[in-house]
Image: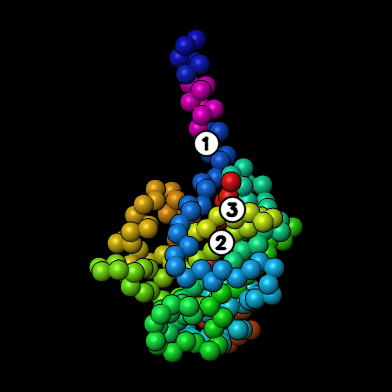
Amino acid sequence: MKTGGLVLSIIFGAFGHSQELTLTPAQTAGPFYPGFNQTQQSGDSDLSNNFTAHGTPIVIKAKVSNKAGEVIPNALIHIWQTDGIAGRYFNDDRTEALDVNFDYYGKSISQEDGRFSFRTIRPIEYPAGEDWIRPDHIHLRVFVGNQIKLTTQIYFSGDEFLEQDLILQNMSDEERKTVIIDYKKNEELSREQEKTILEGKLHLVID
Ligand SMILES: [Fe+2]
């Protein structure tokens, strides 16, 4: 009986665990969060201005859910990142020219099925301190109602600066997998735009 109970609890334990999704890890907003008011009409879900911004064009297809996988509609997602020219934020103190075709920040709202998407370009790395180069990353902040539910960053698989990044080093392997994204060519958009557009899939899991 004892053995049977143990086996059962292991089975239930494993089953229970597999039903819970890994929470997307919280990460610093960094010093360049534009802080735009969520009621302001600043920025939309196309930071790339129809892929005219400098850099590798990408589209992110994403969804928001809780740990049980229940989708979350009407979440507001703030997006901000560097450009594809010099790795600049529009509000940093560097002096290289900004990309006039790039928006630097935007927002998206999850639909009834929890899905949202945005268009942008692959950001480029920038120095964050002595001996520390941030890998290419996109900052995201998720609001549900007026509450900030998550502030995080997403990355690009294969990036040469992932391994030595101090922020990624603080995560478990499982957490890292949720924010390092694989990209493949989006055939339809690429045909339409007559250039290669990459697509990445993202699942944000919030409490
Ligand atoms: Fe950053």
Dominant SS of magenta comes to helix
Badge 2: residue crowd in 10 Å (few <14, some 14–19, many ≥20): many
Q: CA–CA distance between discs 2 and 1?
A: 27 Å
Helix, strand or loop at mark 1: helix
**To which quarter of the image does residue 114 belong?**
bottom right
Q: Is 151 a magenta residue?
A: no
Q: Nearer the viewer, residue 18 or 99?
A: 99
Q: Give x and y (percent) for residue 121.
A: 51, 78
- Amino acid type of the residue tagged 2 in the rendering: Arg
Q: Give x and y (percent) for residue 194.
A: 58, 87
Badge 1: residue crowd in 10 Å (few <14, some 14–19, many ≥20): few
Q: Residue furthest left?
A: 131
State the residue position of label 2.
141
Q: Residue furthest top?
A: 1
Q: Is residue 127 left or right of residue 50?
A: left
- Amino acid type of the residue tagged 1 in the rendering: His
Discs 3/1, front: 3
Question: Which mark identifies residue 149?
Answer: 3
Q: Is 12 a magenta residue?
A: yes
Q: Going 44% across and 89% down the picture, which residue do you hit? A: 97
The answer to whether one can see residue 181 in this image is: no
State the residue position of label 1.
17
Q: For the magenta stretch, what is the residue range?
A: 7-14
Marked residue nearer the N-terminal end (3 or 2): 2
- Amino acid type of the residue tagged 3 in the rendering: Lys
Q: Going 33% across and 62% down the picture, which residue do you hit? A: 165
